[in-house]
C-alpha cells in the first residue's frame, strides 16, 4: 500500500510554495509556518498570506523580533486569530529556549505554543524525517474509507489516528504524510471521489462497497447558536474610531470598531447605552451577518459624526480612514466597514 501511494505521489504531487522540490530537504520554518496557516483554511486562501509572511519575515528570528501588532495586521483576513498569537509566541519561545532551532521530536514540538498533535507530526515527518503521520481532515477521510470505519466523527478521531499510525513507513515518512494529504485533496474528495484514479483502490473497503461517499460517518451537527450585537462607526473628519480587543479570547489582539457585547439577549433598543460617545446615531437598515465556528452573529450598525476636536474615549483611538486597510481588522469588522461605505453614508 505504501509503495503504491508513494509511486503515485512521485508522479502527481501538488506543487505548493511551501513544499520542497523532490529530493530536497524541507525547511522547518517553512513547514511550520505553512501548517499553522493551513489549519481550517484552504490552500488557495493561504498562498498569498504565506508569500507575504515569508517576504516580510524570512526566518524564525525575524518573526520573533517583530512587534505583535505587525504580525496581527499581516494575518488579518486569514481568520482563527489565535493562530497568529500562538505563531508569534512560538517563534519567541524557540529563539529564547532552543537557540532559534526547532526541536525535532513530536513531544518537544507539542510543548510549544500553537503546536498540537497534527502540526507536531507534520513538522516531525516532513522537516525531520521522523516516523509520524499528520492526520488532518483529508487523511481522516482517506483512512475512514480505506477501513470502512463505522464510528462517526468526531468520536472516530482516535481510531483514525491509530489506523494512520500503522501505515507510517520508516522510509520517506514526510513524503508519505504529504501523499496522504494530496490523495485526500485531489482524489479521495468529500464528494465524487475519483476512485478510478486512486492508487489505493485495491486496498479500500469503501470502494469495495461501491459507496465511498458514505464514509467517514458523521454525527448529527447541533444547530449553531445565534448571537446579536451592535457596532458603532464613528467618524471625525477623515478618521474613524477604533479599539484593540483584549489579547486573549475570540479575535484576541485584533482591531475592531467599538460595539456592544455579542449575546443572544441583545436588545437593539438599549444598544446606544453602550455607545463610546454620545452623538446622534443613524442605524443602517441592514445588519451584517458573520459565521464563527461556534456561533453565528448579526451586527446592527450605528453611524455618527463627531466634531474635529473630539478626543477618543479611553481604550480607543482615531485612525485615518485611508489607513484602515493596514489595521488588523478581522473579517467581521471589514464587513462592517464595507457595509458603511456601500451605504453612501
Image (cartoon, rainbow, N blue to C red):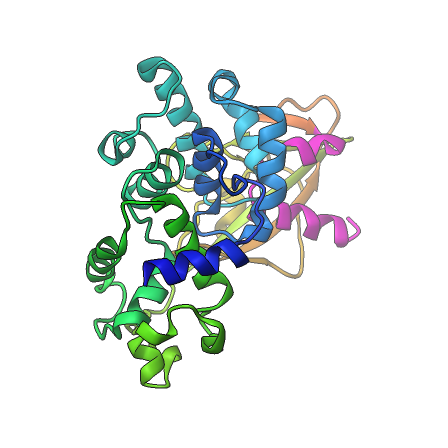
Q: Nearer the viewer, residue 299 or 74?
A: 74
- Residue 11's place in the image compared with 231, above or below, is below
Which quadrant, please, contains the N terminus? bottom left
Q: How many marks?
A: 0
Residue 232 location, quadrant: top right
**Residue 89 part of the magenta-drawn span:** no
Q: In which quarter of the image is residue 117?
A: top left
Of 319 and 172, which appears nearest the observer? 172
Residue situated in front as seen by the camera: 109 or 200: 200
Q: Residue at x 21, y 56 (%)?
A: 166
Q: Is residue 184 above or below residue 116?
A: below
Q: In this view, does 212 lie above or below 278?
A: below
Residues in magenta, as a range = 320-345
Residue 212 position, x and y percent, is 37, 78
Q: Is residue 333 magenta?
A: yes
Q: Nearer the viewer, residue 85 or 56?
A: 56
Amino acid at each position: 500500500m505504501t509503495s503504491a501511494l508513494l509511486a503515485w505521489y512521485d508522479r502527481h504531487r501538488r506543487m505548493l510554495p511551501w513544499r520542497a522540490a523532490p529530493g530536497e530537504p524541507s525547511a522547518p520554518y517553512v513547514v511550520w509556518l505553512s501548517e499553522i496557516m493551513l489549519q481550517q483554511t484552504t490552500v488557495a486562501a493561504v498562498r498569498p498570506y504565506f508569500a507575504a509572511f515569508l517576504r516580510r519575515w524570512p526566518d524564525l528570528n525575524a518573526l520573533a523580533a517583530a512587534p505583535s501588532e505587525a504580525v496581527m495586521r499581516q494575518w488579518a483576513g486569514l481568520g482563527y486569530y489565535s493562530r497568529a498569537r500562538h505563531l508569534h509566541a512560538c517563534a519567541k519561545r524557540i529563539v529564547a529556549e532552543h537557540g532559534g532551532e526547532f526541536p525535532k521530536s513530536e513531544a518537544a514540538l507539542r510543548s510549544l505554543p500553537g503546536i498540537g498533535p497534527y502540526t507536531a507530526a507534520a513538522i516531525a515527518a516532513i522537516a525531520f524525517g521522523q516516523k509520524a503521520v499528520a492526520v488532518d481532515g483529508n487523511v481522516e477521510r482517506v483512512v475512514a474509507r480505506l477501513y470502512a470505519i463505522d464510528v462517526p466523527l468526531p468520536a472516530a478521531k482516535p481510531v483514525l489516528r491509530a489506523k494512520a499510525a500503522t501505515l507510517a513507513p520508516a522510509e520517506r515518512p514526510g513524503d508519505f504524510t504529504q501523499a496522504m494529504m494530496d490523495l485526500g485533496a485531489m482524489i479521495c474528495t468529500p464528494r465524487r471521489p475519483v476512485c478510478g484514479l486512486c492508487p489505493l483502490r485495491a486496498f479500500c473497503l469503501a470502494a469495495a462497497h461501491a459507496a465511498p461517499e458514505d464514509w467517514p460517518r458523521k454525527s448529527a451537527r447541533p444547530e449553531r447558536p445565534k448571537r446579536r450585537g451592535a457596532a458603532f462607526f464613528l467618524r471625525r473628519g477623515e478618521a474613524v474610531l477604533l479599539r484593540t480587543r483584549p489579547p486573549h479570547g475570540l479575535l484576541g489582539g485584533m482591531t475592531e470598531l467599538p460595539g456592544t457585547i455579542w449575546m443572544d439577549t441583545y436588545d437593539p433598543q438599549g444598544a446606544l447605552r453602550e455607545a463610546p460617545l454620545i452623538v446622534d446615531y443613524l442605524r443602517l437598515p441592514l445588519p451584517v451577518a458573520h459565521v464563527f465556528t461556534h456561533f453565528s452573529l448579526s451586527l446592527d450598525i450605528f453611524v455618527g459624526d463627531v466634531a474635529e476636536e473630539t478626543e477618543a474615549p479611553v481604550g480607543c483611538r482615531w485612525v485615518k480612514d485611508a489607513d484602515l486597510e493596514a489595521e488588523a481588522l478581522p473579517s467581521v469588522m471589514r464587513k462592517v466597514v464595507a457595509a458603511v461605505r456601500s451605504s453612501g453614508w
